[in-house]
Image (cartoon, helix red, strand yellow):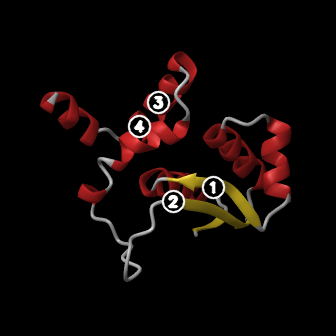
Amino acid sequence: MKELAEQLVNLTIKEVKELADILKDEHGIEPAAGGAVMMASGPGAGGEGGDGGAEQSEFTVFMNSAGGSKLQVVKTVKELTGLGLKEAKAIVDGSPGPVKEGLSKADAEAMLAKLQEAGADVELK
């Protein structure tokens, strides 16, 4: 079990996303459960979010705007959320607004990074 824990802690963001997809698609475990696996590696990654008292446990990725590359942002939202093209486009067109809610810190930060890479103006709430 210790070896398995070590493997989970050392997963890359891409590998964690792949693991979450496998857990959801093949075993019916929703992404929130995959996020719990990712949370195990979160604190060791150098958490930067002390809001004073109790640390926030659920995060929302909030899109302020799609930026200059709207098509790429729609594709990225579709990929990250598992939504259809129409639903992903509706999220992007509806910005400012939430992209996905109730994420672990690790999931939210990974999603934030990918959306920023695609050109979107996003933040964690």
**Can you tell which mark lies on residue 16?**
4
Q: Amino acid at mark 4?
A: Val
Looking at the rendering, which quadrant does residue 24 occupy?
top right
Task: Residue under label 2, please give it.
Answer: 58
Looking at the image, is mark 3 or mark 2 earlier in the sequence?
A: 3
Looking at the image, is mark 2 or mark 4 earlier in the sequence?
A: 4
**Can you tell which mark lies on residue 18?**
3
- Determine the CA span between mark 1 and mark 2: 8 Å
- Determine the CA span between mark 1 and mark 3: 20 Å
Task: Residue under label 1, please give it.
Answer: 101
Number of numbered discs on residues: 4
Label 3, secondary structure: give it: helix
Does the residue at mark 1 contact the one at mark 2 (Cβ under 8 Å)?
Answer: yes
Does the residue at mark 4 contact the one at mark 3 (Cβ under 8 Å)?
Answer: yes
**Of the residues tagged 1 and 3, which is closer to the observer?**
1
Residue 49 lies, in percent from the top left, at: 39, 73
Label 2, secondary structure: give it: loop
Q: Amino acid at mark 2?
A: Glu
Answer few, some or many: residues within 10 Å of disc 2's Cα (few below 14, many 20 plus, some between 14 and 19).
Answer: few
Answer few, some or many: residues within 10 Å of disc 3's Cα (few below 14, many 20 plus, some between 14 and 19).
Answer: few
Q: Amino acid at mark 3?
A: Glu
**Can you tell which mark lies on residue 74?**
none
Q: Residue furthest left?
A: 2
